[in-house]
Amino acid sequence: MPMHALHDEHLDHDLATIRIKNLRLRTYIGINDDEIQNRQDVVINVVIRYRAARAVQFNHISEALNYRTITKQLIAHVEDGRFALLERMTREVLDIVMQHEQVLTAQVEIDKPHALRFSDSVSITLSDSREDHIQTASVGRRLDPPACLWSLHGTSQRYQSLSPLCLYRWWLGRRGFR
């Protein structure tokens, strides 16, 4: 199932993307009596963005974001948990992913197959990002969004390598998207 919110044109190109696709688990999910008493299938898709320069340079797992560790945490949490709402499960899975300091942005989509008659599945998608990643210029200075905007049009050379993501997120925020 495709996930569309994290596109390359909106993110730094030096970020690596990890995709955990169609992680099929069984858990207690729902509010009806049969859902509370019986495990149901869920399908989890995760997109993670992180800076992989050190992993590429040193070719060692200690420098990389270990997706196996993350996946094991997700499996344990979902299979051992009980959830009334798909929204809550999705948020908890996203929180587990974001606990890893290397993660800059993440998106989680969880499908509940056969939740509706005549439908393959119902899904919820949530995403999160670290504010420092969004509002930090590559020169290492923290900027608030208006300063990001100014630096794109100003004459200061120190902001020339500013990430376009800063402007994009500020623009979305001004229009009520978050």
Image (cartoon, rainbow, N blue to C red):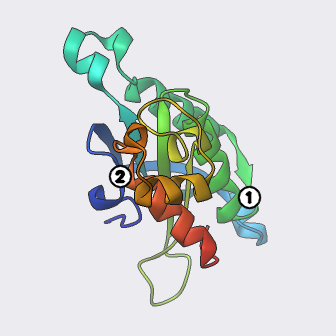
Left or right: 156 in relation to 93: left
Secondary structure beneath disc 2? Answer: loop
Work out whether residue 162 or residue 155 is closer to the camera in this orientation and state it: 155
Residue carrying label 1: 37
Residue depicted at x 35% and y 44%:
160
User: Are the residues flagged by discs 2 and 1 in contact, CB closer than 8 Å?
Assistant: no
**Which quadrant would the C terminus be assigned to in this image?**
bottom right
Amino acid at circle 1: Gln
Residue depicted at x 34% and y 42%:
161
Work out whether residue 159 or residue 61 is closer to the camera in this orientation and state it: 159
Left or right: 33 in relation to 43: right
Question: From this viewpoint, is residue 9 visible?
Answer: yes
Q: Label 2: few (<14), some or many (≥20) within 10 Å?
A: some
Work out whether residue 155 or residue 97 is closer to the camera in this orientation and state it: 155
Amino acid at circle 2: Leu
Residue carrying label 2: 11
Q: How far across and how far down the image is residue 45, in percent?
A: 41, 53
Query: Where 5 falls versus 48 (above or below)?
Result: below
